[in-house]
Image (cartoon, grey):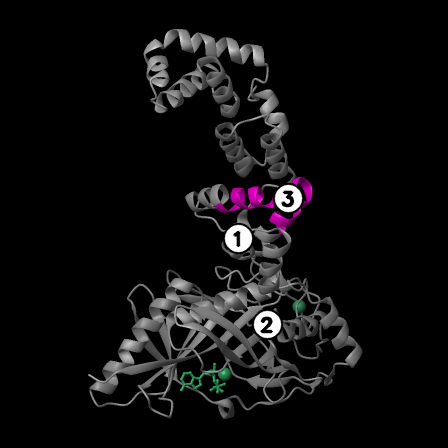
Amino acid sequence: MKTYETVIGLEVHVELATKTKIFCGCTTLFGGEPNTHCCPVCTGMPGTLPVLNGKVVEFAIAAGLATGCEINQNCKFDRKNYFYPDLPKAYQVSQLYLPICHDGGIEIETSAGKKVVGIHEIHMEEDAGKLIHDPWEDCTLVDYNRCGVPLIEIVSDPDMRSAEEVIAYLEKLKLILQYLGVSDCKMQEGSLRADINLSVREMGAKEFGTRTEMKNMNSFKAIARAIEGERKRQIEVLEYGKVITQETRRWDDNKDTSFAMRSKEDAQDYRYFPEPDLVPIVISDEWLLEIENRQPELRDEKMLRYEKEYDIPAYDAGIITGSKHLADLFEETVALCGRPKEVSNWLMVETMRLLKEEEKEPEDITFSAEHLAGLIKLIGDNKINRTVAKEVFEKIFKDNIDPVKYVEEKGLSMVSDEGVLKATIEKIIAENPASVNDYRSGKEKALGFLVGQTMKEMKGKADPGAINKILKELLD
Ligand code: ADP
Ligand code: MG
Ligand code: ZN
């Protein structure tokens, strides 16, 4: 068999985090009773006129700047005409001829090394409604709540060569958009969905092969499986001496295979023409500069800053900046209690462990920086030991309790009275003559046993360091 190379380009649709829709004042909130987030404009009633939401343009520009694009300061909207019940106007307002951003790229890193994935363009458009097929009633219902929700479509160049690169690209893109605050990128809610264009060609071939497109993929795992499945299918077709048909296919993740949906339509099929109800968009130099100056620090910069400013390892910085929420929590906590490495440890080890246990994402963390900082202060002031701290942290993680109050109420602070500690240790020494002898005859391990016994006697509320010290003083 010949060897083949996989070529992939993505079209990523991202729902913008504006409060209102792109051309009317309806809310963009996810969910809601069907057809309650609608008005005559977004349901395409005759005689209504769209008014562009300025925030959409601002978010599109921010996304473009963060992905190294050039901004088209004079751009406009076009109508993409098609008949389908999810689209009440029978056209989607989009941008074909002059997209707002073009010719950018983002750097990704995989096991194959670093590379730049080109961004062909980013354009603005409106979302469509949702069809709900009811097999019981044998009918289809339509919910227009998503109609007119603003989207940007980010079109990459066909620069990716593996599922690994695709995931790296999507992860990176997601982080950029989340850090910018232009989208929450929740894939389960459809805020970020990817169309995968894929072709294969013989290794070393100059021309690309014919591609297929798999639409609206909304989980990284399904994307990886879809790429693998489609790559294999195409190679098989070619190996049989047949040709690939350019078409839209639907990936069925349960059946682990894709099905042909329709032959691919091209721009002509949509009878695009300039949108006559909206004026062209003119982006002044001042506005552009203003947005540029307001761009927040993105992941890569933040990572470098963490290493320098907080003196934490690159590994820690990578994990913490892997989620905007985690990064914010880290900075807020350090501002309250210092000790960045300690803060980073709690976030990377215990927090991640508990998140995994509950199958949650860092975005789902509910505890406050104040309470984590409070815990770290208790440890620093030698009020509680590590074992107790872990227990308290679980309560913080689950219920965001105030650690200072909790430790007080439950009587968890360490006994700091030297007299009590000494008396307990003397008791343990008297009760364990064999271990005392072992220690005195050079078996260091015996000391650990005695520390443990003392700790047990004090119900865990003692400082192991202090026990160690006093024990040695008494025995040596
Ligand atoms: P269309 O106008 O038909 O949507 P585009 O040229 O805009 O096609 O490309 C759509 C997407 O398909 C882009 O992300 C692009 O990178 C990708 N693409 C184009 N040609 C190929 C190919 N031969 N193999 C894989 N991906 C491709
Ligand atoms: Mg396209
Ligand atoms: Zn509306």
Ligand 1 near label 3 (Cβ, under 8 Å)? no
Q: Residues within 10 Å of mark 2 (few under 14, many from 20)?
A: many
Q: Is residue 390 left or right of residue 104?
A: left
Q: Amino acid at mark 2?
A: Leu
Which circle's residue, 3 or 2, is located before the other in the chain? 2
Q: Give the residue displayed 56% in from the left and 35% down from the top.
A: 396
Q: Is residue 32 magenta?
A: no
Ligand 2 near label 2 (Cβ, under 8 Å)? no
Q: Is most of the magenta stretch helix, strand or loop?
A: helix
Q: Amino acid at mark 3?
A: Thr
Helix, strand or loop for disc 1: loop
Quadrant where the N terminus sits is bottom left
Q: Give the residue displayed 68% in from the left and 62% down from the top.
A: 19
Closer to the eye: label 3 or 1: 1
Residue 223 is situated, as x and y percent measured from the top left of the image, at 39, 68
Q: CA distance from mark 3 to mark 1?
A: 18 Å
User: Taking 242 as reference, is 471 above or below it?
Assistant: above
Residue 356 in view, yes or no: yes
Q: Is residue 239 left or right of residue 460?
A: left
Give the camera-side residue of 350 and 416. 416
Which circle's residue, 1 or 2, is located before the other in the chain? 2
Q: What's the magenta region?
A: 328-348
What numbered label is drawn on residue 476?
A: none
Closer to the eye: label 3 or 2: 3
Closer to the eye: label 1 or 2: 1
Q: CA distance from mark 1 to mark 2?
A: 37 Å
Give the camera-side residue of 130 and 303. 303
What numbered label is drawn on residue 333?
A: 3
